[in-house]
Image (cartoon, helix red, strand yellow):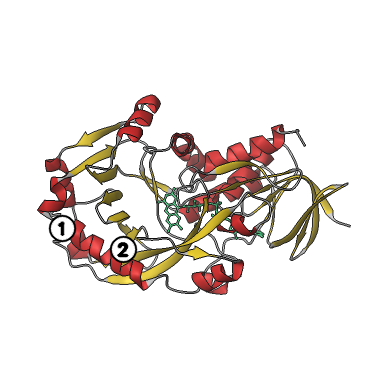
Amino acid sequence: MAKSFEYGVIGCGLIGSAAAKYLANGGASVAAVGPQIQPSHSYSTLFNSHDDQTRIYRTLDDDGQWANWARASVERYSLIEAESGISFATKADCLIIRDTPRSFDRMDTIARKNRTEHRALDEGEIRHLLDGVAHETVHSLEARIETKLAGILNPRRLLEAQQLLAKRYGATFIDAIATEIEFGAGGVEVVTSVGKFRFRKVVSCTGLYSAFSHIMPPAKTLGRTMTFFEVSQSSLDRFRLRHPVIFQAKGFDVYIVPPTLHPNNKYYLKIGGDPNDYELQSSSDVADWFRSAGRPVVSEFHQNALRIVFPAFQLTPAWTKPCAVSQTVSGRPYLGSGLINNTWGFTGCSGSAAKGSDEIGRHAASIITQDNAR
Ligand SMILES: Cc1cc2nc3c(=O)[nH]c(=O)nc-3n(C[C@H](O)[C@H](O)[C@H](O)COP(=O)(O)OP(=O)(O)OC[C@H]3O[C@@H](n4cnc5c(N)ncnc54)[C@H](O)[C@@H]3O)c2cc1C
């Protein structure tokens, strides 16, 4: 006989774990189904978007929805850290640089409405922070810097904190993969690699797999490549840039995470942003992709971008890493009802959902507890 819970969460990533936490804190019986924290991609059969040391967080955004989710979450980071005893966020100003045809108007309007603490930088300040960026590049640039709710978070530690709190509130975590989901007389039946479970309602938070889940509206899964550059101790002292940077200039749109200490006690600068899309069509494409080193052409693009942004530094790539994101047809995130009765879910993270994952998870929990329409 299938074990029953009131609410089920499929996917124990950043959003699923946050949703499980909020559902369990509301006093309901909750089980979250998904592979637990994995030590290395090479042993996995299912992959995720959070297996890394750094994610940029900020609340400045061109899209009000992302801005609101990020703001609500970032404002709770210190509470989550205090309650879990796990620190995951390091405050740092976040710099967004654009060439002049690409406007900041939408971002400025949203920032004014949200009273986001930020300011515009002039050319001299951009040049000072980037420490030698090619003159002709700086000449036409504009920038905004977010000074309060911004920085770098460690997504693995955020996940640990959310799961620890979810378990403390009574959530059960089932280390398994969901293979079938069906709505029937007894509720939503979920078949997993360790048996069947029955739920009154289910929320699907399967991240980059949301496109293949048959629960969520259509989305694409896009492979992304990141390149890591080792920064030696002597270069580190010369490196003036301590901020995450989003650089959207002619010919490239990249983000740069400044040198960060990794578990091997070395500092690595990370750069991401793909020059074009690389679509993954199936779960087996995803598995092949995560077992690869990403696309060499993207790493070359990253090296060129760094040569323009930091001409004074000769940085050699240490390694590249694949990752993947889901994207809806409209490009906007979707959090709402699923295509099977009594299911809801989130899709379309577009590579932006780590910072706002606590609030997205909270909303996911509140829509399944409040939406009695079906
Ligand atoms: C290269 C890269 C850089 C990024 N940079 C940033 C950034 O700087 N700032 C930012 O805010 N965001 C960033 N993101 C996005 C962020 O990491 C994702 O939006 C976030 O991890 C999404 O969380 P999630 O819970 O939806 O998905 P995930 O964290 O991927 O979790 C989904 C989980 O579902 C599980 N799952 C899938 N299918 C099943 C199934 N059938 N049964 C059980 N479990 C299942 C998976 O195992 C996984 O654990 C980046 C993403 C990438 C790829």
SS of the residue under disc 2:
strand
Q: Quadrant of the C terminus?
A: top right
Q: Confirm or deny contact between disc 1 and disc 2 (CB under 8 A).
A: no
Residue 114 falls in image quadrant:
top left
Vertical arrangement, residue 311 with respect to residue 296, above or below: above
- Viewer-nearest residue: 323 or 174: 323
Q: Quadrant of the N terminus?
A: bottom right
- Viewer-nearest residue: 347 or 79: 347
Q: Does the beta carbon at disc 1 come under 8 Å from ligand 1? A: no
What residue sits right under mark 2 in the picture?
Answer: 268
SS of the residue under disc 1:
helix
Percent across and percent down for residue 78 are 45, 38
Q: Marks 1 and 2, how far apart in space? A: 14 Å
What residue sits right under mark 1 in the picture?
Answer: 238
- Classify mark 1: residues with Cα within 10 Å, few (<14), some (14-19) or many (20+): few
Q: Is residue 124 left or right of residue 173?
A: left
